[in-house]
């Protein structure tokens, strides 16, 4: 991105729409000035300009909830920026995954406001368990028993998924699929493969 091509407003600011690069959920709307945009490009983490405090703020500098920048694009008028990030925690100051949690239109259908947050939480827990191996933990036990035991569990859970699908039991299929996904995440954590790597492969195939 050429910063000189960005159209800032009369206050020297440009709106920045922050989007989760994986789930495509919009996380927040913030503002950048020329300096914060330059720092964002240099750090590969979001740096905004606070209009209320009138100062720069590096997202997550104190909370640890940083946002690693995957890409930046400006719109057709070059007066708004789309920042795609990999969040390392909640985007909202209230502790929510996204600042856009409230719905103004009710369709009658249940909506999960943060559908991918549980995957981030789960992979963080698994990484911690692999390091600390807390006593009495089912996950710790599997890590200690090794890859053969974990692989066996994946085979068992895959069989349960197939049975649920063949029985056309949607509730059971959802539960067994969750068990299978959990053990798959456990396996790749044990083998040192990040979930982001798996998502990157899917993304490359999709393109």
Image (tube, rainbow, N blue to C red):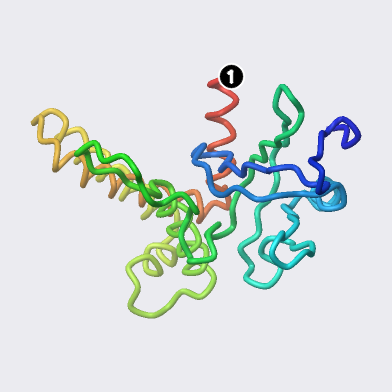
Q: Quadrant of the N terminus?
A: top right
Q: Quadrant of the C terminus?
A: top right
How many numbered circles are shown? 1
Residue 51 spot, x, y in % from top left: 71, 59
Question: Is residue 131 or residue 114 the one in the foreground?
Answer: 114
Residue 15 spot, x, y in % from top left: 69, 43
Residue 17 spot, x, y in % from top left: 62, 42
Lateral position of residue 20 relative to residue 54, left or right: left
Residue 107, located in which quarter of the rendered image? Answer: top left
Q: Tell me what residue is drawn at x 43 percent, y 58 percent.
A: 122
Question: Considering only vertical position in the picture, is 108 above or below 140?
Answer: above
Residue 90 spot, x, y in % from top left: 52, 59
Q: Outermost residue, front direction? A: 10
Q: Tell me what residue is drawn at x 54 percent, y 37 percent.
A: 199
Lateral position of residue 101 relative to residue 111, left or right: right
Question: Is residue 103 or residue 63 the one in the foreground?
Answer: 103
Q: Tell me what residue is drawn at x 78 percent, y 46 percent.
A: 13
Q: Tell me what residue is drawn at x 46 percent, y 60 percent.
A: 96
Q: Residues within 10 Å of mark 1 (few under 14, many from 20)?
A: few
Question: Considering only vertical position in the picture, is 178 above or below 72?
Answer: below
Residue that numbered label 1 is attached to:
207
Question: Considering only vertical position in the picture, is 124 above or below 9?
Answer: below
Secondary structure found at label 1: loop
Lateral position of residue 66 relative to residue 77, left or right: left
Residue 7, located in which quarter of the rendered image? Answer: top right
């Amino acid at each position: 991105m050429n910063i000189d091509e960005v159209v800032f407003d009369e206050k020297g600011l440009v709106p920045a729409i922050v989007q989760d690069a994986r789930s495509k959920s919009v996380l927040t709307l913030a503002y950048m000035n020329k300096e914060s945009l330059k720092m964002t490009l240099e750090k590969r983490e979001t740096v905004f300009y606070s209009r209320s405090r009138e100062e720069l703020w590096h997202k997550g500098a104190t909370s640890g909830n940083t946002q690693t920048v995957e890409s930046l694009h400006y719109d057709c008028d070059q007066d708004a920026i789309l920042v795609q990030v990999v969040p390392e925690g909640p985007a909202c100051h209230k502790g929510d995954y996204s600042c856009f949690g409230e719905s103004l239109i009710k369709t009658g259908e249940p909506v999960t406001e943060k559908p991918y947050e549980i995957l981030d939480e789960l992979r963080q827990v698994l990484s911690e368990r692999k390091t600390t191996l807390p006593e009495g933990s089912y996950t710790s036990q599997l890590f200690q028993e090794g890859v053969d035991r974990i692989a066996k569990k994946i085979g068992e859970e895959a069989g349960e998924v197939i049975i649920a699908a063949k029985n056309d039991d949607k509730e059971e299929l959802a539960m067994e699929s969750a068990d299978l996904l959990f053990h798959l995440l456990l396996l790749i954590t044990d083998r040192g493969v990040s979930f982001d790597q798996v998502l990157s492969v899917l993304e490359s195939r999709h393109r």
